[in-house]
Image (tube, grey):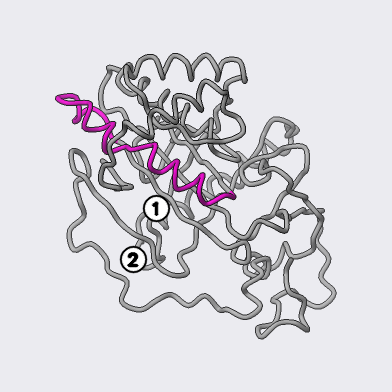
Amino acid sequence: MTAQSGDRSHPLKKPSGHKPPVPRWTLKLPDDVSHVYTLYAGVQCHSTRTELSKTIEDRIEVILGGSAAALDVLRVTNGFDLAHAKVWVAYFTIENHFRTTLDNLDLVGIWNELGSDKSQIGLWIESFSAPVSRLETNYARLDHKPGLSQLPGVEQPSHELTAYWGAGRDRIPASAHDLFPTPEGIPTPAIIPAGLGQRLRGSSYDNMCHIRSGQWWERCDDDERVAYKQNLQEVLMQGMQYLWEHPQETGTIGLRFLHNLKRRRAADQGDLRRRVLSQLGRPRAVVVAPSLTSEDLQRSAAACQAIRRQEKVHDVA
């Protein structure tokens, strides 16, 4: 919950008497959830041989589909990534499931298995954890459940911390006593890496801001769709272009436009899991989560004894 004005060291930016012009809702996580763990994974294909990326995509889908508390699958359309790259956004509320999933993804091992085809595939992963006190959400409707709103046990109460300058910061509970200053001396690369064919790794810093914002068009009427395309879209893209072209001035580290893809049905997920496990030709660890079958758990137990630990690297190009 957001701290009220009397409980704060730093006052709300909300103007006195402000009432939002339209209703908005936020996310309330179960009381026993202290952190949300976020994992982004991506597969880039630099070849016309799409079967190379398809095999890896299926493996990632099986691991994340069986472990994440909430999962979205997307396709890159623009930004700091290869167009058409496939991306997964996975959310966890149990740290052990999150850490085990990072180990099981083993993108370094997958990439090494490509042999002479390494130059054709790029793999990357970004992960971080955030205390609930440093999360903020803002939803325009309740009949669409993207991202964190898919987590089990959540509620979506209405709120009024929206539609004014500084509302996003006000929605962060920790803003009551923290101004989130940017740390001094953040290192920046002296040389921009080529990326292709390189193995890169990086780390975040205190008070780094991660924003995921989306639009849902399925129930949008024609007038609103036309207004967006004719008036708002160009302004939005100009703003995004400015961020891309001025990373040091704006502090922008990465920016992607993505298009949501439909998830497989439960039955199709089960078929995919069995096919991927059989294609591996050897046991492979799978996260122990409620959605896994008894067959998966048996395979996981055998795999945990057989699999060799490899160096933990979360960024592979």
Q: Secondary structure at mark 2?
A: helix
Query: What's the amino acid at mark 2?
Result: Gln
Please tell me whether mark 1 or mark 2 is closer to you in this view. Answer: 1
- Residue 69 lies in quadrant: top right
In the picture, measured across the screen, residue 231 lies left or right of residue 78, that is right
The magenta segment:
93-122
Q: Is residue 86 magenta?
A: no
Task: Give the labeled residue for mark 1.
Answer: 254
Task: Give the labeled residue for mark 2.
Answer: 248
| Residue 143: percent from left, percent from top | 77, 37
Residue shown at 19% from the left, 46% from the top:
194
| Residue 84: percent from left, percent from top | 40, 30
Task: Give the dominant element type of the magenta stretch: helix, strand or loop.
Answer: helix
Query: What is the number of callouts on the image?
Result: 2
Which one is in front, 169 or 315?
Answer: 315
Q: Residues within 10 Å of mark 2 (few under 14, many from 20)?
A: few
